[in-house]
Amino acid sequence: MTERPKTVTATRVVRTERPTAHVVRLVFGGPELIGLPVGEFTDHYIKFVFPVPGVDYPRPMELAAIKRELPREQWPRLRAYTVRDWDAATGQMTVDVVYHGDAGLAGPWAAALRPGDEVLFTGPGGAYAPSPDADWHLMVGDESALPAIAASLARLPVGAPAHVFVEVDGRADEQPLPSPGTVQLTWLHRGGGPVGAALVSAVRELEFPPGTVHAFVHGEASFVRELRRLLRVERAVPREALSISGYWRKGFDDEGWRATKPDWNRQVEADEQPQPLPAR
């Protein structure tokens, strides 16, 4: 995974949209974004920077310097989001933010933004794009992975086969996902069920096509862990053919998830180890 140094870029909102009831689409940009290294990957992400109210930060902001010079309670908060679209000619970037009312930090902030408002972010980072050498593609995710799945589908080679499973609250959260590939897209409606349970069932029931797969699986950490074991152990998908990670974890804010993610990664690695035979 690659990521630019933690220099904070300051730009402005161009417009906002509401493609679905639970998504705020932000389009921002200006001359300071022209030449930004976006385009190599389809899971490019940035981290929005939320200054602590009342704290005077130097400009340009450098997160490393802030962490050296200010106490932790004055460090800006960060929230990672995938780049949904990028127009290199105009320097305009599109990011979708999931919005569920007043809950959370980024959702209410995004809903309140208006053209001309300032946006601060670091990045981009990224690591995945659909391999043109794969025989078929598997893409699985909840709302948090939907922007990356949308960008990945748009990048598929013409006619490339793909099985795509996306879980959302309900039909009103579905949105167009155009692609030059041959895509079998399944929308799964969560309703009141656990996040990701429908995705695990759908992948488990999928009859894998012949040939090599390139898989992208991201979203809430619990279902991602289940699917990683399913793909790596039960389906024997090679590690290098799999992009998989927990974007978030139920019951944790972003800071809490980042703090616990190393332990989670170790647990996931342990899931892939051969299990000892029962004693006779």
Image (spheres, rainbow, N blue to C red):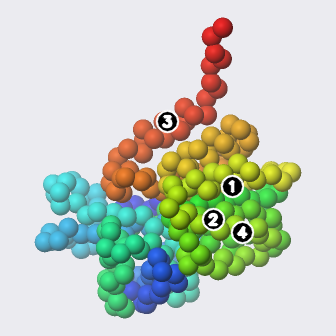
Is residue 49 visible to us here? Answer: no
Q: Quadrant of residue 173?
A: bottom right
Query: Disc 2 or disc 4, which is closer to the eye?
Result: 2
Q: Dot 3: what SS?
A: helix
* Amino acid identity at mark 2: Leu
Tell me the CA gap for discs 4 and 1.
12 Å
Which residue is found at the position 71% from the left and 58% from the top?
138
Which residue is found at the position 64% from the left and 26% from the top?
274
Q: Dot 1: what SS?
A: helix
**Which residue of the protein is positioned furthest toward the right in this rendering?**
210
Q: Dot 2: what SS?
A: strand
- The residue where tag 4 is placed is 185
Tell me the CA gap for discs 2 and 3.
28 Å
33, 276: nearer the viewer:
276
- The residue where tag 2 is placed is 188
* Horizontal side, residue 194 vs residue 136: left or right: left
- The residue where tag 3 is placed is 267
Tag 3 and tag 1, C-beta contact below 8 Å: no
Q: Earlier in the sequence, mark 2 or mark 1?
A: 2
Tell me the CA gap for discs 3 and 4.
31 Å
Is residue 118 visible to us here? Answer: yes
117, 11: nearer the viewer:
117
Which residue is found at the position 13% from the left and 72% from the top?
54
Tag 3 and tag 4, C-beta contact below 8 Å: no
Instruction: In the rendered structure, find residue 202 and report the number of the disc placed on it.
Output: 1
Q: Earlier in the sequence, mark 2 or mark 3?
A: 2
